[in-house]
Image: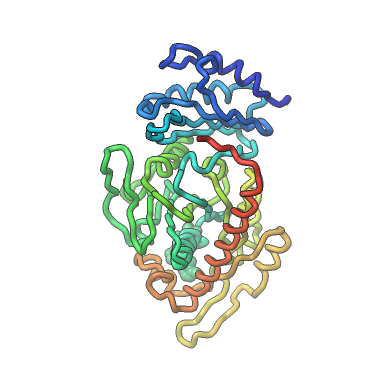
Amino acid sequence: MSEVTNDVILEALKGVNDPISGKDVVSAGIIQGLQTLDGNVAFAIEVPAEKGAEMEPLRKQAEDTVFALPGVVSATVVLTAERAPSAAPAAPQSGQQTKPGAPVSPQGQGDLLPGVKSIIAVASGKGGVGKSTTAVNLALGLAAGGRKVGLLDADIYGPSMPRMMGISGKPNSADGKTLDPMENYGIKVMSMGFMVDEETPMIWRGPMVQSALEQMMRDVNWGELDVLVVDMPPGTGDAQLTMAQRVPLAGAVIVSTPQDIALLDARKGLNMFRKVDVPVFGIIENMSYFLCPDNGKRYDIFGHGGAKKEAERMGVDFLGEVPIEIEIRERSDAGTPITAANPDSPAAKNYQAIADAVWAKIEQGQASDSLAPRIVIQ
Ligand code: ADP
């Protein structure tokens, strides 16, 4: 498939009408920062600050038009406010359409979450390996370093964050449009479980999954965050792949038990992120060994060192291990995660060490990012 050029894109955009000037969007001069890279197209449409919400259909139409062109694998269109010195910036609205199997586009992270410096995903090859427990304790470990941390429960089918973070009630909306995240242990949290009862089975269609996730990013007042930890849905199917593409991720960590490292489930997780060009920070081995509460002795039920070796073989870092421990489960299920409730326990120290390793990866990524060219939308 031949690569799409800016000329072709602009030609197509001449068919999109700007309702304010009555001209097409190209003649009206409101297309800005058009960038095309390997079929990934991104640009901004400049609109008056007060018309941000009204112009969403225009944004969508422009995005659909570009996405329909041959050779386009993804289209990301954002609305941006006029650069008049006194004008308040319009709330950035963005979207992205990505064709299946396409590499992720160079999307501006600030578009969906302007105040969030880094977003990381916690994923697993299958359910029940302790992914959510790890996400919670990782978030707490990151916050212990004085960082501002958010936790987004992207598992809209089986949200567990309200229970694990010990939060009940519904999020507040001061303006009727955006939601304030819930908060506990100094972490801002958003989960579909706050909106719908945890027991209610949720049936979602593909596009709804995307828009639910986008709303939990765009329409939540996350404010300034050093890092947003995203608890991904379990597994590595199409829905997960789409999510990995939709969320502008700085990196991903894969949680795995010794058994599924052996069964190569972890490898599936790894490949999923590699497919969409998201750096994998490494593997965390959960339920790695048994710490006996009676005598404090460690039992390597599944043998020891397998995960580390497997990580090496897969070419990713090993970020650390967490024992299988009754206290972890009890506290996790009671909404008092061990890293917050018993930070001096050996398990909490394991989580802390993992959080430090993840933070080092985030910082490394930021340092190399600053050398790479960026799309700047003013
Ligand atoms: P997932 O998100 O992968 O489905 P969860 O985090 O919900 O998994 O964990 C599944 C169950 O295992 C929960 O009851 C949780 O408390 C428990 N669990 C997770 N990690 C550990 C651990 N290291 N030791 C003991 N229990 C654990």
Question: Furthest-bottom residue in view?
Answer: 295
Q: Is residue 139 left or right of residue 162?
A: right
Task: Give coordinates of residue 70: x percent, y percent.
Answer: 65, 22
Task: Give coordinates of residue 350: x percent, y percent.
Answer: 52, 73
Residue 199 seen by the camera: no
Total of numbered circles in the picture?
A: 0
| Residue in the image at 43% along x and 14% along y | 21
| Residue in the image at 32% along x and 44% along y | 179
| Quadrant in the picture for residue 353 | bottom right
Task: Give coordinates of residue 243: x percent, y percent.
Answer: 52, 43
| Residue in the image at 64% along x and 30% along y | 36
| Quadrant in the picture for residue 52 | top left
Q: Is residue 162 left or right of residue 116?
A: left
Task: Give coordinates of residue 84: x percent, y percent.
Answer: 42, 29
Between 251 and 263, which is closer to the camera in this rendering?
A: 251
Screen quadrant of the N terminus: top right
Residue 254 seen by the camera: yes
Q: Is residue 354 left or right of residue 372?
A: left
Between 79 and 284, which is closer to the camera in this rendering?
A: 79
| Residue in the image at 58% along x and 62% along y | 256
Question: Furthest-top residue in view?
Answer: 22
Between 366 and 289, which is closer to the camera in this rendering?
A: 366
